[in-house]
Every structure is written in C-alpha cells, then in structure tokens.
RNA sequence: GCGCCCGUAGCUCAGUUGGAUAGAGCAUCCGCCUUCUAAGCGGAUGGUCGCGCGUUCGAAUCGCGCCGGGCGCGCCA
C-alpha cells in the first residue's frame, strides 16, 4: 500500500478513537509544500469546526492515538491545527523498490470498480470533423483511459449525429445535384456541398424547402431508396471518422448513433404521457416545470418580458417528429438496461448545459427509481479561440477541419525535428514528427481547465520549453538515451536498493508516489489537466535531478544503480501518464 | 431582460474537502555545455487574485451587491 494511503487509514482509525461517531470518509492527506512536510492534513480543523472543538486540542488528541511510525517521522501539529507528515526515507525507498520489482506503478486499482458509460466525440454524419471535435474527443478519451487504468469498467459510446432534419436537404441534393466523381474523390466535401447548395435554395425558395421536407418524411417512413442513400451517407462518414480516430488512437466500444433509438421514441413519449411527465401544448408534447424548484434554478422556466414563462422540453413536435430530448431519454434508458452503469458521463460543449439540466431532471421525473441508481454527469468544456480572441478559424474565416489541423501539426513538428535532429533518417524523423505533432495538439487541449476557453497557438504547443507535450516527450527520450548507453539496455537492476540522498533524488522520488492520487483526482472531477500538471512537474523534477546527479558517471556503483532505478521509474510513469492522456512517446528525438 | 460561465504577473494560463509567504511558462535581465540529448538548467524582475461588503481562526476559492467580457434563451442538435 502506498504510504499516503496508510497514513489516511491510520488517521481515520485515530479519529474514530477520539470521536466514535465522526464521519471519517473525508480525512484525506494531500501532498504539500516541502517546507512543511511531504503530506498534510487539514481535515481535523474542519472537523473541529463542525463540532465546535478546539482544533489544536483535537489534533493533539488524535495524534496521541495515531501510529504511523512505520512510514513517517515524528508528526507535527502546526498553525491552527494542520498535521504535517514527513516520510521516512526507508519507507520511500521501499515503495520505489516495490515499483522497480513491478509490484505497482504508484497507483492502486479501485477497490470498488464502477461501470461508467463515457459518451464523447459525437460528430455529425455528412459533415467534416472540425477543430471543435478535438475537445470532446480528447477529453473523453483521456477520461476513458484514466477510468480503465484505475480498474473501472468503461463503455465508450460515440453517439454520432446520424439522424435529423438535415437529411431532407441532403437527400434532395443527392438525388438532384450529386457529382459522383466528386463523391469518390472526397465524399464528405461533396456531401457538405450538397447541403450548402440545397440549404441556400431552401432559404430563398419555400417550394424547395417543401421538397426537402417531403424527402425527410419519406426517409422517416422507411422509403427504401431514401434509407439506402442515408445508409450510404453514414458509411462514407464513418470511413472519415475512422481515419481520424485511427490517427488519434481513439477507440470506442460502441457507436450507437441517434438513429439507433428511433424504434424506441414513440414508446418513450407514450410512457411520458401515461405517467403524466409530458403533456400536450399547442399541438406538441412537452415536459413542463413541476414547480419544485425556485424559478431561477428551474430549467423549464425562462424569464421574458418581466415574468417567468414556460420553457418546456419538447419530446414530440406538432408535426409528429421527435426531438433530440426524446432520443437522449431513450438513450439513457437503453444504457441503463444494457450496462447498468453507476455513471453516464457526457463530454459535450458547455453551451449545452441547459439541455442536460432538462434531460437529467426529466429522466428523474420519468424513472425516479432508475435515476437514483445512476449518476448523470455533463462534463462541459469551453471554446478554442484564435489569437484575435475570437473563435478559432482559418485565415479565410472557415472552421478548421480536424484532419487538416493534424496534418499541419505533423508538418510543423517535422520541420522542427529536421532542424534539431538532422542526423536522424527521414522515416524516423517522420515518425517522431507524428508523435510529437499529434501529442502537442492533444496536450494543448487537455492542459487548460476544461471549462475555460483557450487560445490556440502553434508555437506554444510545439515549444520544447514550458508545459508542453514535446517537453515531456523530451524528458522521456533523455531517460531512454541513458539506458541505450548501458551494455545491456534491457536489463533490470536486480534487488534494487534505493539510496536517496541528494535533494533532487528525494524530490523526484516523492513526486513519483503521487501519481495515483493524481489519477484518482482526474477520475473524480473529470479533469485531465491535473494529470498534465503532474507530469509536467515530474518532468521538471527529473530534469533537475538529471542536471545535478550523474547517473552513468556516478561515484559508486550502488549510487549508479539507485539512480538508474529512479530513471527507469520516472520513464515508466511518464510513459504511462502520457498514454493515459492518449499521447505516445518516442525513444529518441 | 433573465440565466450560466469567466475576470489571477506585461502576455498565456494553473491553483485538489476554504488552509500556511498565490504558482508556472512566455517575454525581459544575469549566469551555466572538457560530464548521460543546452530541444536543457539555475537565478532575478514582475500580483490591491476586477471592485466593495460580509461569513470564518483563515477567502483567489463561500454569500450578497456593483463593474467588465463570453455564451445560452429554435417545434435545430
């Protein structure tokens, strides 16, 4: 067991001894400023406050019952009632030695694995994936990887937009103005063209709009020709999606698009009506406020002209068509029936927040019991901005296509690699450029707090200094370079004995221990940026160590071996951590 | 208008149950390659955490009110 976990358990026991009825579940220790120790707990102060106790007295009483001699030096009570823990060197060395024997890599699998559905990426059929999709795709993938690493059961689901009113226009375009040759060359571009042309015509000419609508009605009615064209559009789109996902290394367990739920929609609406959750209004069917929330917090109300008026979640339009609310309700029901998840996580743009609020509340009113069994979470994120502070666009003002963005990342990385490592053969430089370029884009997207907008900047993300993927990959490559110089690069140190003396060795070693709690924080709060920052600090601590502590030229063989172990463990955590973010490493760059 | 999010160093951003003297990178300045990748490292400069009031032993973090910015308010998704 990792030392901080041991401390937490002992702390909980000690607190129970002093306050038998206390809730000890929040008694965490956290890494802290080295001048205070390695870990600190401020939980006793909160506990004392709840119970109107003197915090220092409580700390003293708990300390009297706290036995962590095995892993810690003498514990200090500081300030208003902090507990400061300093790890014993021997405990630190033992933890590292166990990792060197492959007993762990600084995290433990969840004791109670959860089943989690992660819904992310969700591109639209017949449209090119654009830069905006990198956010949902990258964050979602990092989250699914983190959850899996921690031992949870994950079902990743790409809820593609393969149904909806746009298909009326697309079908009309396909039948009347399709350019077969263009479709063969670049199917998505041709589909996009069809949509744009017909859409413009519909705006100008109501008769064209009626034509498009009638194609949509035929599709919805199951017309054989329209179904077949629609399926073809999905097929060519999926080819495009798969190409992008292949480059990004993203995998889905299932791809159940919106159309998959069509057969269930009428039943969902009937059930909503039967249970009195939805009702008729102006020919449509919708879910209205039940009045249980104050108006400000009620997503079914909107303030207009000085009063709160109904803003229902429509589940069936007056023309009989269904809305995405209906599809999303059917989707939740299907997922619960199929996988019985503890959580369903939606990695979707923050702007859809109000929709998810309505969705989750509606589901809770519809199936209260099932809703109690599952945590529905909207993991939202902000926009990508250009240097000008406006949404990121090409110079000509178009949205940036994801494929082209990835091409440019690789090209820019290739140029840099060729400048810095001209001696490497071209195929190797190409591969390095691929890993570095794609890594840079992904990392730049994962690094900011997901809820804030961020500014897209090629030079910053591809820089080798600062908090970037290339910097982390470089740290890894430097470590691997050390091992290449060994007579037997693949050999492991037998019976490793860590000698941790230099401050840089200690700082690095202690930081390795915090990998697991970082992963847990990522999973808990759906924030991959915690892992980014952890890895950046790890790389920084390694580089300080590397500058100050010779490895291969260490004074004594024992020191050398100890440092090799530190290097190896750092490399493994860096590699594992980057992999968890969906980023590859190279042995040389 | 109403709601949501945001406002932290010149710039771009972190900031884990409210915790100790608010941190990085870039930029600027000063050092460091006869030593494992200098694509690097060390140091310096730089902050009334938008403003005010409040809660608290303790507030960038919580509450209220302003100011400034973004987004949402469609029988689209």
Image (cartoon, coloured by chain):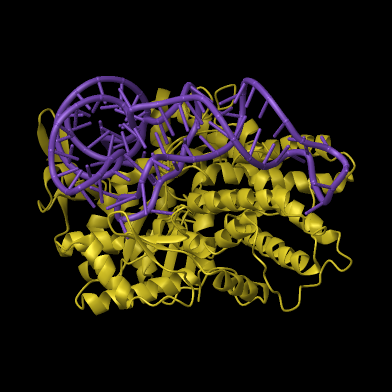
Residue A205: % across, % down = 41, 25
Q: Is residue A16 left or right of residue A340?
A: left
User: Chain A takes which shade in the image?
Assistant: yellow
The chain drawn in purple is: B
| Above/below status of A103 relative to A81 | below
Give coordinates of residue A384: x percent, y percent. Answer: 49, 35
- The one of A464 and B74 positioned closer to us in this rendering: A464
Q: Please indicate whether residue A469 sits to the left or right of residue B23 in the image.
A: right
Instruction: Estimate the x, y position of residue A414 in percent, counting from the top left.
Output: 77, 38
- Residue B75: give x, y in percent of width and height: 29, 40
Asked if residue A234 lies left or right of residue A278, the reply is right
Write down the quadrant of residue A575 in the picture. bottom right
Front-lying residue, A319 or B77:
B77
Say whether residue A423 is visible: yes
Residue A300 visible in the picture: no
Left or right, A399 with reference to B9:
right
Which residue is painted at 76% across and 69% down in the image? A558
Number of marks? 0
């Amino acid at each position: 067991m990792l030392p901080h976990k041991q401390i937490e358990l002992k702390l909980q026991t000690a607190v129970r001894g002093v306050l038998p009825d206390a809730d000890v579940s929040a008694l965490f220790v956290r890494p802290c400023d080295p001048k205070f120790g390695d870990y600190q707990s401020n939980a006793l102060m909160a506990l004392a406050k709840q119970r109107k106790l003197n915090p220092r007295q409580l700390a003293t009483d708990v300390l009297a019952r706290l036995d962590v001699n095995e892993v810690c030096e003498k514990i200090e009570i500081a300030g208003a009632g902090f507990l400061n823990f300093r790890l014993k060197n021997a405990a630190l060395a033992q933890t590292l030695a166990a990792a060197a024997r492959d007993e762990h890599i600084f995290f433990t699998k969840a004791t109670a694995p959860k089943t989690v559905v992660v819904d992310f990426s969700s591109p639209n059929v017949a449209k090119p994936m654009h830069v905006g999709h990198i956010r949902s795709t990258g964050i979602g993938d990092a989250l699914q990887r983190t959850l899996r690493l921690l031992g949870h059961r994950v079902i990743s689901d790409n809820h593609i937009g393969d149904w909806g009113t746009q298909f009326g226009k697309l079908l009309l375009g396909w039948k009347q103005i399709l350019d077969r040759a263009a479709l063969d060359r670049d199917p998505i571009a041709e589909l996009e063209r069809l949509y744009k042309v017909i859409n413009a015509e519909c705006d100008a000419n109501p008769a064209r709009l009626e034509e498009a609508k009638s194609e949509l009605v035929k599709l919805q009615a199951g017309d054989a020709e329209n179904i077949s064209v629609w399926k073809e559009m999905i097929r060519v789109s999926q080819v495009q999606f798969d190409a992008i996902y292949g480059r990004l290394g993203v995998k889905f367990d299932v791809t159940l698009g919106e159309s998959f739920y069509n057969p269930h929609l009428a039943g969902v609406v009937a059930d909503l009506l039967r249970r009195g959750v939805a009702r008729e209004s102006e020919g449509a069917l919708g879910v209205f406020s039940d009045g249980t929330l104050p108006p400000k917090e009620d997503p079914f109300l909107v303030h207009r002209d000085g009063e709160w008026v109904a803003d229902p979640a429509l589940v069936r339009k007056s023309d009989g068509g269904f809305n995405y609310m209906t599809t999303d309700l059917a989707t939740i029901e299907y997922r619960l029936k199929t996988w019985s998840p503890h959580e369903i996580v939606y990695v979707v743009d923050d702007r859809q927040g109000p929709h998810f609020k309505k969705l989750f509340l509606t589901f809770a009113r519809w199936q209260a019991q099932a809703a109690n069994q599952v945590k529905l979470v909207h993991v939202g994120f902000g926009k990508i901005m250009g240097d000008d502070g406006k949404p990121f666009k090409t110079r000509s003002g178009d949205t940036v296509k994801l494929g082209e963005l990835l091409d440019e990342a690789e090209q820019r990385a290739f140029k840099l690699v060729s400048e810095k490592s001209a001696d490497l053969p071209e195929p190797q430089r190409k591969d390095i450029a691929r890993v570095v370029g794609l890594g840079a884009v992904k990392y730049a997207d994962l690094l900011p707090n997901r809820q804030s907008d961020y500014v897209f900047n090629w030079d910053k993300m591809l820089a080798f200094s600062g908090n970037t993927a290339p910097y982390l990959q470089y740290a890894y490559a430097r470590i691997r370079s050390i091992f290449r110089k060994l007579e037997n690069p693949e050999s492991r140190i037998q019976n490793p004995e860590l000698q941790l003396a230099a401050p840089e060795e200690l700082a690095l070693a202690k930081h390795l221990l915090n990998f697991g709690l970082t992963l847990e924080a990522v999973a808990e709060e759906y924030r991959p940026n915690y892992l980014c920052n952890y890895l950046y600090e790890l790389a920084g601590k390694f580089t300080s160590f590397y500058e100050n502590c010779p490895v291969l030229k260490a004074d004594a063989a024992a020191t050398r071996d100890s440092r090799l172990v530190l290097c190896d463990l750092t490399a493994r955590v860096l590699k594992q951590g980057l992999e968890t973010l969906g980023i590859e490493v190279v042995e040389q760059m």
